[in-house]
Image (tube, coloured by chain):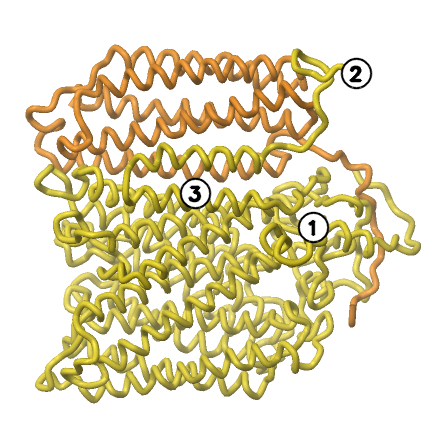
Amino acid sequence: MTGQASPTALPDVRAPLLGTWRDAPGLRGFLTTVDHKRIAARYVLTAMAMLFLAGLLAVDMRLQLSRPEMERMGPQGFNEAFALHGSTMLFLVSVPVMEAMALWLIPLMLGQRTVAFPRLAAFSYWMYLGGVLMLWIAHALDITPDLGWFEYPPLSGPAYSPGHRADIWAQMITFSEVAALAASVNIAATILKMRPPGMTLARMPLFVWTMLVASLMTIFALPSVMLVTSMLISDRMVATHFFTPAGGGDALLFQHLFWFFGHPEVYIIFIPAIGFVSSIVETFSRRTLFGYVPMVLAVLGIGVLAFGLWVHHMFAVGLPRLGNAFYTAASMAIALPAGLQIFCWIATMWSGRPRYATPMLWVIGFIATFVIGGLSGIMTASSPLDLQLTDTYFVVAHLHYVLVGGALFPLFGAFCYWYPKATGRLMSERWGVIAFLLIVGGFNIGFFPMHLLGLEGMPRRIYTYGPDMGWGTLNLVATIGTFISAAGGLVFTANAWLSLKRGPLAGADPWGGATLEWATSSPPPVHNFDHVPVVDSIAPLWMQESDLPVMTGLRSDLREVLITSVVDAIPQYRQKSPEPSIMPLIAAIATSVLFVGSIFTPWALVWGAIPVAAALTLWFWPKRPRATDGPFGVRRS
Amino acid sequence: MIGLRPMRATGDLSALPDGAMGPTNVVWWGNLGFMLIEGTAFALAIGAYLYLQSQSSSWPPPGDRLPGLLWSGIFTVFLLASEVPNLWVWRRAHGRSASGVRRGTFAMALIGLILVGLRAVELDHLNIRWDGDVYGSVVWMLMVLHSSHLITDLGDTIVQSVWLYTHRIDTDQFSDVQDNSEYWTFVVLAWLPIYVLIYWIPRLA
């Protein structure tokens, strides 16, 4: 399989590799690139732009609620604001940004040149961008979805929602889910078949484990939402009766299918964050993670349990009591693996030599905030209590504590942690700390009062309230908190922007990390690594001697990657990796035409499929010599 | 390049093959991923059918006729029989026979065309429209879901056959033929529970 090379000088392959893996210059390169780093970077930046827009909507809503009887927004405007905010945050920020981080990081952590299916990664981004444009261009044309981030029928059905607002929402989901599924298959195949020699499953960095589990969860959860939104569109367009009781349909079927996806989705967002936190805690505690095996088992446990919880979003719809009791128990059970992880991180810090740089501060902010969210989660998991709390601001507080505290804070930490790897420069620590204090402080001032407002009975999704309700003061405090964290967001963004040029040079390994991405230069070259790293432990850069063991022999004159075995990562063969191509973009445009057309006429599924088929055929058409045998072979003269 | 560690060669990969077949090939895993996604969609659609049936006092609702057994039976027998040539193609790919995979994929494309024709006749004998009631809606959903897979794999097989007849074939292409053949088996297997559900469960209930 592999011969022993002499320990003499390594062949200098950098120059030919740079030429082989280079993109075309200018716009052509921009549109045809299959470089996982470029694709992932635009994925992250687009998600950040969406986060900014969704944040503006949040500020807008908080201004409206800051005092009783404010009239700056009407009920319709408020409905649109929270529907757009929630849909954007869940479908266009949280899930895609995690996939994007994985598309960027996983090949680097695996010492690989690219992902398993580079063109699929490009297609995934273009489809995601299609979803972004679908929602926000429609908003610019005043066709804004206005029924929240889960559009329950019968309200979203043809009888109560004429026009195309609900269709825009449903088809935006199809876009973003196609993108997420494509990314997940790509990430899972990369993790299973492209690990460096020696990186057995038991030596995978925890982040890689979390992305494997999150990708598999995506594969099993997202078909449900695609199915249910397709059923909704079909009820609205071709008069099927899935959710209309008059035709024998059942509106609750929508809720079951939606939450069969919707609950795992929360963990699809949270599990990658576990990976970020673990990477940061390990590096900044300067020791390997305490309890690696229990941590992996906990991630797997959360992945399985997450599929057994969906009914806890439906406690108030009148299901059988025994069912409610079962889902209460299952919802509380998931606190065990989540709690175990928190203890493992604390133990790692306790027994290590922690350094409190910005990424580590975000981890501490995450633990404090997420524990509060977890505790309010145990409260809402109890079905009798949930009957009182559901549809109040208590739930708004809870979901923001777990999603912002549990996923976005680790994401911000991850951003600071890997920023020097991506850009070659360090961000300012001083401004990083200021941004951290403003965001975490403002967040808690903004959202903690909502627990109390919920307990006082303030319902969610109301555009205003009377002065006699007594909710004015706490709402004003919440609005002030929102402004503080928004200011923190601006500081964070300015820090990232200014550090691109002004930040001190980072070098390959500014934090003293343990995993392979720190073994290449910052930013990494187009081909990531000159040679294939070899791994013999869970923390290769800490355990090995000063020099990095590598394998040579991958071609430098054409795009080639190493494929290894699933369990033991034993080298199996050299796989050709595709060249840049415009076809993923063309295929995404053709698919977009089909999707957009199909909210106006069912025939779009027929005529729209023709350009999609043509684009996919050209995409997958292998470039090889013509046949010289067989009935259609070219005869040599 | 700042701060890069020195590297030490411990092995050479140039002697490894430059292609592989079956689960060794990374593309096989991508194919598996998409089968898992679509299999989940089938399972959930089947679950939706059973859920709606459980919510209804009679199934199909009074006044609805049951779907016809003749054409669906012919389709199902023919679909199951297509596994014989399909597995033959798989083995020709495994044995790296260029003429075998060319003829095999051509035959499978013809078989697929016949099956799509049979499916069209079958749809004409469902005896219910999608907008009649929820029973009609969910029957049509399952049929459309399965038919779209049938058509997709037919398209894939036609393109593959054209390519194979006109180009030189190597390991990766034999592997592609195997992947396509496995996908066809997936389409066949996915049909069986749907067939039982649509044509037999209402009769047995």
- The residue carrying mark 2 is A636
- The residue carrying mark 3 is A591
**Rendering coords of residue A420 (x, y %):** 64, 72
Q: Residues within 10 Å of mark 3 (few under 14, many from 20)?
A: many
Element marked by disc 1:
loop
Q: Residue at x 57, y 88 (%)?
A: A430
Circle 3: residue type: Thr
Kindly indicate whether the residues beneath marks 3 and 1 are on one polypeptide chain: yes
Q: Badges 2 and 1: C-beta atoms under 8 Å apart? A: no
Taking the image as shown, residue A320 lies to the left or right of residue B153, namely: left
Kindly indicate whether the residues beneath marks 2 and 1 are on one polypeptide chain: yes
* Quadrant of the frame with the C terminus of chain A: top right
Q: Which chain contains the residue that carries disc 3?
A: A
Circle 1: residue type: Pro
Mark 3 or 2, closer to the camera? 2
Q: Chain in orange? A: B
Distance between mark 3 and mark 2 Cα atoms: 41 Å
Q: Which mark is residue B189?
A: none
Element marked by disc 3:
helix
**Rendering coords of residue A299 (x, y %):** 47, 57
Q: Earlier in the sequence, mark 2 or mark 1?
A: 1
Q: Earlier in the sequence, mark 3 or mark 2?
A: 3
Compared with A505, A215 (above or below) is above
* Quadrant of the frame with the N terminus of chain A: top right
Distance between mark 2 and mark 1 Cα atoms: 44 Å
- The residue carrying mark 1 is A196
Q: Residue at x 80, y 56 (%)?
A: A549
